Amino acid sequence: MFKIANIPNILTLLRILIIPVILVFLEIDNEFYRWLALLLYIIACISDFLDGYFARKFEIESSFGRFLDPIADKILVVSVLFILVSKATINGFFVYPALVIVIREILVSGLRDFFAHSRETLLVTNLSKWKTLIQMFALGFLMVSNNFETSLILNIGYLGLTIASVMTIHTGYIYFKKNLRLFK
């Protein structure tokens, strides 16, 4: 039976199921499929917002959602970054901002795993949400940058990726500093 309590978890599961399709479309390396990949990526990003919004608004947060939602987010970001690096859309200096983002995702996942059995909740900042938004926009621009003759879209993507990586370092520092008390 369908219940409103299932909506956030269904959105998270759908996001996970969309990810391989996005990656296949990016791998095909055709203008039409890059636009389809972007469309699915936008749907995945919107579902990321909506699952959290519905869970909080209707007070239907679940252990399953708290576990799976951050994993879905990391799979989406890391796999798109990986494909964009493998296709040389992200190359040269800009591989480093991508690497910073991947390393932070691993470290934060490790922290979450470390405290999974604790009654403590890891604190997240609003700045992290802005970082995620900029990162998602940057990846979207990079996904379709080959569809344009001008490098403007690519440069916007690179700028967003660089800003997101700087924010990643800053929010990672804040994240660890705020949650350091949990190590005691």
Image (cartoon, helix red, strand yellow):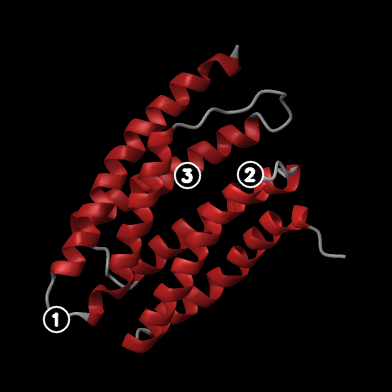
Left or right: 70, with 126 as reference point: right
Spatial CA distance of label 3 from label 2 is 26 Å
Q: Which is more foreground, mark 3 or mark 2?
A: 2
Q: Locate residue 52, reporting x and y percent.
A: 59, 48
Q: Which is more foreground, mark 3 or mark 1?
A: 1
Q: Tag 3: Cα neighbours inside 10 Å, few (<14), some, or many (≥20)?
A: many
- As helix, strand or loop, the secondary structure at mark 3 comes to helix
The numbered mark, 3 or 2, whose residue comes first in the sequence reads 2
Q: Nearer the viewer, residue 137 or 182?
A: 137
Spatial CA distance of label 3 from label 1 is 33 Å
CB under 8 Å between callouts 3 and 2? no
Q: Tag 1: Cα neighbours inside 10 Å, few (<14), some, or many (≥20)?
A: few
CB under 8 Å between callouts 1 and 2? no
The numbered mark, 1 or 2, whose residue comes first in the sequence reads 2
Q: Locate residue 142, reporting x and y percent.
A: 29, 67
- As helix, strand or loop, the secondary structure at mark 2 comes to helix
The numbered mark, 3 or 1, whose residue comes first in the sequence reads 3
Which residue carries the number 3 mark? 105
Mark sitting on residue 149: 1
Task: Give the answer, above or below, for where 158 lies relative to 23.
Answer: above
Which residue carries the number 2 mark? 57
Which residue, as the protein is rendered here, is positioned at the far right? Answer: 1
Task: Give the quarter of the figure containing the C terminus.
Answer: top right
Residue occupying the point 72% across, 24% down: 119
Q: Amino acid at mark 1?
A: Glu
Q: Amino acid at mark 2?
A: Lys
Which residue, as the protein is rendered here, is positioned at the far top? Answer: 184
Which residue, as the protein is rendered here, is positioned at the far front? Answer: 58
